[in-house]
Image: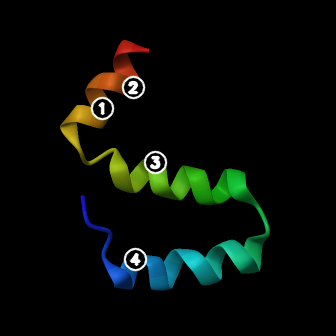
Amino acid sequence: MKIDRSILGILLPLKKALHGQEILIVIILKFISKNEIFVTIASGK
């Protein structure tokens, strides 16, 4: 799975600006949640 550099370009400065890993995780989870496999794992847990 390859991460788009444009996504990293948004997330990395955002992480530095917010200084909040919880917020960064939420953003990543929302992005990953488009993946059906992740949704299956999340709903199974």
Q: Which residue is mark 3?
A: 29
Q: Are marks 3 and 2 in contact (CB under 8 Å)?
A: no
Q: Residue at x 36, y 83 (%)?
A: 5
Q: Are marks 1 and 4 in contact (CB under 8 Å)?
A: no
Which numbered dot is residue 39?
1
Which quarter shows the C terminus? top left
Q: Are marks 1 and 2 in contact (CB under 8 Å)?
A: yes
Q: Mark 4 or mark 1, which is nearer the start of the sequence?
A: 4
Q: Position of residue 22 (x, y in %)?
A: 69, 50
Query: In the figure, residue 37 lies in which quadrant?
Result: top left
Q: In the picture provided, is 13 more to the left or to the right than 45?
A: right
**Which kind of residue does numbered mark 2 sit on?**
Ala
Task: State the SS at label 3.
Answer: helix
CA gap between label 1 and label 3 equals 10 Å
Q: Residue at x 63, y 77 (%)?
A: 14
Q: Which residue is mark 4?
A: 7
Which quarter shows the N terminus? bottom left
Q: Which residue is mark 2?
A: 42
**Which kind of residue does numbered mark 1 sit on?**
Val
Task: State the SS at label 4.
Answer: helix
Crowding near the residue tagged with mark 2, few <14, some 14–19, many ≥20 C-alpha atoms within 10 Å: few
CA gap between label 1 and label 2 equals 5 Å
Crowding near the residue tagged with mark 4, few <14, some 14–19, many ≥20 C-alpha atoms within 10 Å: few
**Which kind of residue does numbered mark 4 sit on?**
Ile
**Which kind of residue does numbered mark 3 sit on?**
Leu
Q: In the picture provided, is 44 more to the left or to the right than 28?
A: left
Crowding near the residue tagged with mark 3, few <14, some 14–19, many ≥20 C-alpha atoms within 10 Å: some
CA gap between label 2 and label 4 equals 22 Å
Q: In the picture provided, is 9 more to the left or to the right than 37?
A: right
Q: Mark 4 or mark 3, which is nearer the start of the sequence?
A: 4
27, above or below 19, in the image: above
